[in-house]
């Protein structure tokens, strides 16, 4: 048995109350939730910036900021269903 296989076999905590992989999955979901919060902050920052800067370049930024938020929410919901 290779050292890596021994490590994996010794690291198998599925019979215990604390499951390492459940902990990792929870961390990923928390990370995705924080990313959704970041995407919402980007929406706010783009709105504030568009009040200061005028021109034709404002609407594409708003559009992509909303797309970014939508994708972030989609990834969060996907992670909740898959993980």
Image (cartoon, rainbow, N blue to C red):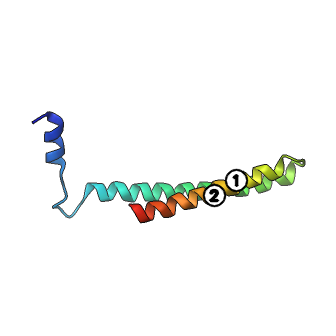
The spot of residue 10 in percent (x, y) is 14, 46
Image quarter of residue 27: bottom left
Report which residue position mark 1 lands on.
Answer: 65
| Image disc number at residue 40 | none
Pick the residue in front: 67 or 28.
Answer: 67
The spot of residue 2 in percent (x, y) is 13, 34
Could you tell me which residue is drawn at 78 percent across and 50 percent down? 60
The spot of residue 78 in percent (x, y) is 48, 61
The reply, left or right, for residue 17 in relation to residue 47 is left
**Furthest-top residue in this view:** 2
**Furthest-left residue in this view:** 1
Label 1: which secondary element: helix
Could you tell me which residue is drawn at 86 percent across and 48 percent down? 53
Image quarter of residue 44: bottom right
Circle 1 packing at 10 Å, graded few (<14), some (14-19), many (20+), is many
**Furthest-right residue in this view:** 55
Above or below, 29 against 55 in this view is below
Could you tell me which residue is drawn at 65 percent across and 59 percent down? 40
Label 2: which secondary element: helix
Could you tell me which residue is drawn at 18 percent across and 48 percent down? 11
- Of the 4 image quadrants, the one containing the C terminus is bottom left
- Of the 4 image quadrants, the one containing the N terminus is top left
How far is mark 2 from mark 1, CA to CA?
6 Å
Report which residue position mark 2 lands on.
Answer: 69
Pick the residue in front: 67 or 19.
Answer: 67
Determine whether label 2 and label 1 are within 8 Å by CB. yes
The reply, left or right, for residue 32 in relation to residue 26 is right
């Amino acid at each position: 048995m290779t050292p890596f296989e021994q490590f994996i076999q010794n690291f198998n905590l599925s019979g215990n109350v604390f499951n390492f992989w459940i902990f990792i999955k929870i961390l990923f979901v928390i990370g995705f939730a924080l990313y959704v919060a970041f995407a919402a902050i980007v929406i706010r920052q783009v709105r504030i910036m568009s009040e200061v800067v005028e021109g034709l370049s404002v609407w594409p930024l708003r559009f992509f900021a909303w797309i970014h938020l939508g994708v972030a929410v989609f990834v969060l919901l996907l992670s909740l269903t898959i993980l």
